[in-house]
Amino acid sequence: MSTKNCNPLNSVYCNLKIKLAGNLSEKDLAGLYSCTLCNDCHTADFNRGAREMAVSRSLVAPHVSTIGRNIREKGNPYGISGNRAGSGKCDTILFRGCTPTYKAPEILAAVESLLGKKGVQYGLIDNETCCGNVLFNLGDKASGAEVVRANIAKFKAAGVKKIITVCPGCYTSFNKYYKGQDGFNPEVVLAVDLLSGFTLAGDFAIQDPCHGKEKSEVVRSLLPGSANKSVSPCCGAGSGVMTHDRLLASSKAEKAVGASQSKIVTYCPFCYLSLSAARPEKVSDIYVMLDKHARPSAPAHE
């Protein structure tokens, strides 16, 4: 059932109700998870805290259980089977991410092509699994911590010292939940950080994702002349909303894309997935665009 609107008061209300009454109704849970945690309303911390309290009290929304089970059993929130083969021991890896691998492989292919053109050397982790960021956003801290521990053990066994990510959510996750844990302190970079020298002229509306917003200037250096910014602070589908309430997610995406006068360029695979589902002709991914239309001004050595 669609909740139709993301109401900031749901976060505050649910936070207080759990503390005072110790429970939430089905309707309360639906409202609590109709939020992408973009924090445009400045209540994301209330929401996340309420979600964590709810899960700790076994008040678990159906989509939270589904996503957690998919990650445990299949290694990704989509529940898609597949073994992501690796390349053995390596100090630098490209962490491919769930959405680029299973939902937008054209983005992953473009990133690999661009890194190749730049001469960036990297390996791939064997049987790569979800970074766990979505679990923390859903309030399931215990499952998220379990994913982090398992991945750190895998990274350390492979000798990983540097992680290149395609997805800003993965970038945030590695910096927030992995660094400093169990002696693991990798350098973490978003792929756009390694693409200096590539430029593509045009006046685009740039969709800055909820995660990795600090990369906005890097992105604009790759797209000189793009003074426009997306009219939406969020693609509408993050933090489990696409699974929880697809109608809400698609309506927010349609509104964001429809209100933009320019072509929207994303640097988040999940934003791309959400917005392009609404208006594919108006949405492009920065990696795909650069790989098709731009060339580096000079070779780089990483």
Image: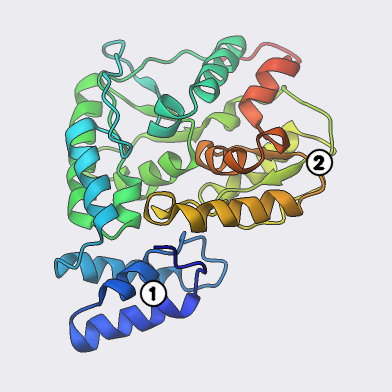
Please say whether residue 22 is visible from this viewpoint.
yes
Check disc 1 and give the amino acid type. Answer: Phe
Question: Outermost residue, bottom direction?
Answer: 20
Determine crowd level at label 1: few under 14, some 14-19, many 20+ residues with C-alpha closer than 10 A.
Answer: many
- Tell which of 140 and 116 is nearer to you: 140
Return the x and y of residue 249 as percentages of the image width and height: 51, 54
Does dot 2 land on a helix, a strand or a loop? loop
Identify which amino acid the numbered label 2 is placed on.
Ser
Q: Which residue is mark 2?
A: 226
- 176 w.r.t. 82: above or below: below
39 shown above or below 171: below
Q: Secondary structure at mark 1?
A: helix
Taking the spot 31% from the left edge, 24% from the top edge, the residue there is 160
Q: Position of residue 24 (x, y in %)?
A: 24, 77
Q: Which residue is mark 1?
A: 46
Asked whether the beta carbons under mark 2 and mark 1 sit within 8 Å of each other, the answer is no
What colouring does the structure picture have? rainbow
Q: Which mark is residue 102?
A: none
**First of labels 2, 1 by sequence position:** 1
Report whether 108 appears left or right of 59.
right
Q: Is residue 294 visible?
A: no
Image quarter of residue 114: top right
In what quadrant of the picture does the C terminus appear? top right
At label 2, counting other C-alpha atoms closer than 10 Å, the crowd grade (few under 14, some 14-19, many 20 or more) is some
Residue 1 x, y percent position in the rendering: 39, 63
Q: Nearer the viewer, residue 139 or 30?
A: 30
Q: Residue at x 37, y 55 (%)?
A: 244
Is residue 221 toward the left or the right of residue 83 in the image?
right
Please name the residue shown 41% across and 25% down the image: 101
Left or right: 18, with 284 as reference point: left
Return the x and y of residue 70 as percentages of the image width and height: 23, 39
